[in-house]
Each structure stands twice: as structure tokens, then as C-alpha cells.
Amino acid sequence: MKRSTGLALLALAWGLAAPLVGHGPSALAVGTGGGQMVLVRTERRLPITGDPIWELQLLLPDQPPRAYEALVGRVRRQDGDRDQLGSKAPLPRGRYAVTEITPVAPTDDAELGRFLWIGLQPEFPTARRGLGIHHDPSAGRGRSSGTDGCIGLIHGNDLLVLGDLLRRSGTTELLVRD
């Protein structure tokens, strides 16, 4: 089985295993429970584009920490105004609530990559809207590398694993430290 086919089947199975809730027919349940995600900047960079690599950590009670490589914002906007709408800078520091976990539809913007969208709502005043976690299909590929401010996981299969762990653990909090 081709890798992309296997991942697509995993995404489909993941979606069918969760009860449907939310605003649309494809919205998936987000529970409430223990655990927390933490986003931190690392010193590492992608070799060709120079994008800073961020680390999205998943901390679950009684389990070893997990970490996923991500790009956040555009390489030349890392020092931009993180509270300004449309700045393409990284997410502002602070706490966020996970609002939804939904499959990415074929008609969605290609920048969202494949598989899932994990919606985030800031729990503090900011002009930023429409933030989330998704796959970054442009990671390391020239000027389009990075995101418009979301957390873009570099590896698509990491997003499937993260989505499943969030759903099963009931984790609904993200802390952006840097």
C-alpha cells in the first residue's frame, strides 16, 4: 500500500471513530481532560530556507513527553507584531483553547496541507483570528515555506498522531511560551 494511501485510510478511520459534534458535518469531538500542549522555539533551522524549527510538545499525565517539529509563521516575519491580524508572524504568547479537530477537505486552502485542522482560540485579547494546527506542505520549499501564523507540522503523519492523542486524552490547552 502506498504511504499516502495508508495515511489517508488512517485519517478516515480516525474520523469515523470519533462522535460528530460542532458546527459542520465533519466536525469531530474534542473532549475535556488532562494534558497540555506547549509550543517553544528551538535553535534549529531548516537547511535550505532557514526557517526556524519550533517544537510542539504534548505533555500527558503518566506518559513520556512527545514532541513534533513545526514551522510557525514565515521566516522573515519571526520578529513581526504577533498580535497584528495578517502579520504572518508566529502566534502570540499565551494560552489557547483547542476548539475543534476536523478533517481537511479537498476544497480547503492547499496551505492547510492534508489530514486535519486543529482549531485554536486565544484566551487573551489579540487581533489574531483563524489560528490552528495543520500540516505544512510547503515546509522547506522556497518562499512559500512556513505558515501565515499557524502551527504547521512539518510531517503530516505527526498531525494524525497528535489529533488522535488530543481526542483520546481530552487535552484542550496550548501554551505558547516563545
Image (spheres, helix red, strand yellow):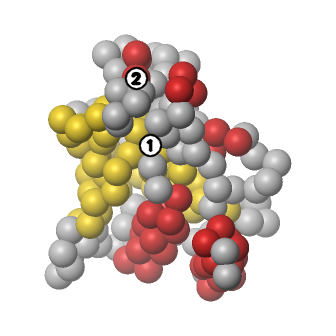
- Give the residue type at disc 2: Val
Is 58 on the left or on the right of 154, as rendered? left
x, y percent for residue 34: 29, 72
Q: Tag 1's secondary structure?
A: strand
Residue at 75 percent across and 46 percent down: it is: 108
The disc placed on residue 151 is 1
Compared with 117, 148 (above or below) is above
Q: Tag 2's secondary structure?
A: helix
x, y percent for residue 85: 52, 19
Is residue 176 shown to the viewer in this render?
A: no
Residue at 37 percent across and 77 percent down: it is: 169
x, y percent for residue 172: 40, 61
- Give the residue type at disc 1: Ile
Compared with 21, 129 (above or below) is above
Ranked by sequence position, the earlier of labels 1 and 2 is 2
The disc placed on residue 90 is none
Is 90 on the left or on the right of 67, as rendered? right
Query: Dividing the picture into quarters, in which one does residue 59 lie?
Result: bottom left
Mark 2, Cα crowd under 10 Å, few <14 / some 14-19 / many 20+, is: many
Is 23 on the left or on the right of 146, as rendered? right
Please identify, in this view, whether the residue under mark 1 or under mark 2 is nearer the observer: 2
Residue under label 2: 75
